[in-house]
Image (cartoon, rainbow, N blue to C red):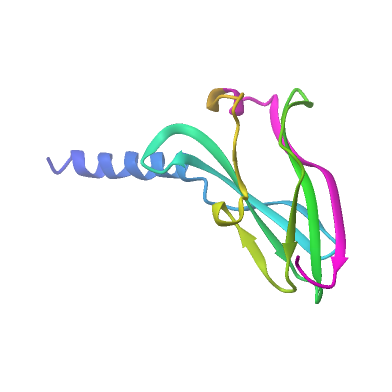
């Protein structure tokens, strides 16, 4: 039993690294607004569930901004799936994160295995950023 425990622990650690994907990566950084993202299973209890892309929007400005964009999933650099335009009001020095603010997306058309290919990518399309006096 003692020989199996270290092997099991190593396998468990590697599997968690592969599925957790908790590292955040910057997708957009302009005019004081930064967008970070991470991928994770949509059902935390099921590593094989559809992946979800979650964003963190951070406003480092000293004023409120309105940030509008569409989320686009691409195959071979062609838009394959696109969400509706969404607008987020971000107060000065604040961040919006994840599901609470509607910042997680699950593809209805692209499987996890297709997302693992080099032909898959995503981007923020139709970006509009503007200074605001207040959030509506």
Q: Nearer the viewer, residue 13 or 37?
A: 37
Asked which quadrant contains residue 66, the reply is: bottom right
Horizontally, is 51 left or right of 121 in the view? left
Quick one: which residue is furthest to the front in this view? 136
Tell me which residue sits at (86%, 52%) in the image: 128
Residue 34, image x, y percentages: 74, 59
Query: Quadrant location of the N terminus?
Result: top left
Query: Quadrant location of the C terminus?
Result: bottom right
Residue range in magenta is: 114-136
Relative to 108, residue 57 above or below: below
Q: Nearer the viewer, residue 68 or 29?
A: 68
Q: How many marks?
A: 0
Tell me which residue sits at (67%, 26%) in the image: 118
Asked which quadrant contains residue 111, the reply is: top right
Residue 53, image x, y percentages: 60, 42
Relative to 54, residue 50 above or below: above
Does the stretch in magenta take in 60? no
Relative to 29, residue 19 above or below: above
Quick one: which residue is furthest to the bottom in this view? 62
Residue 120, image x, y percentages: 68, 28
Asked which quadrant contains residue 16, the reply is: top left
Horizontally, is 72 left or right of 54 in the view? right
Horizontally, is 136 left or right of 42 in the view? right
Does the stretch in magenta take in 119? yes
Residue 81, image x, y percentages: 71, 28
Tell me which residue sits at (78%, 46%) in the image: 69
Tell me which residue sits at (55%, 56%) in the image: 100
């Amino acid at each position: 039993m003692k020989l199996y425990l270290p092997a099991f622990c190593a396998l468990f650690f590697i599997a968690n690294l592969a599925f957790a994907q908790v590292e955040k990566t910057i997708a957009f950084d302009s005019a004081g607004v930064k967008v970070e993202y991470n991928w994770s299973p949509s059902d935390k209890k099921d590593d094989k569930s559809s992946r979800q892309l979650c964003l963190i929007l951070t406003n480092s400005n000293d004023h409120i901004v309105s940030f509008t964009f569409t989320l686009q999933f691409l195959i071979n650099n062609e838009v394959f799936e696109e969400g509706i335009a969404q607008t987020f009001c971000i107060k000065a020095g604040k961040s919006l994160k994840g599901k609470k603010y509607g910042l997680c997306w699950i593809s209805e058309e692209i499987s996890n295995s297709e997302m693992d290919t080099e032909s898959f990518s995503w981007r923020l399309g139709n970006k509009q950023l503007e200074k605001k006096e207040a959030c509506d």
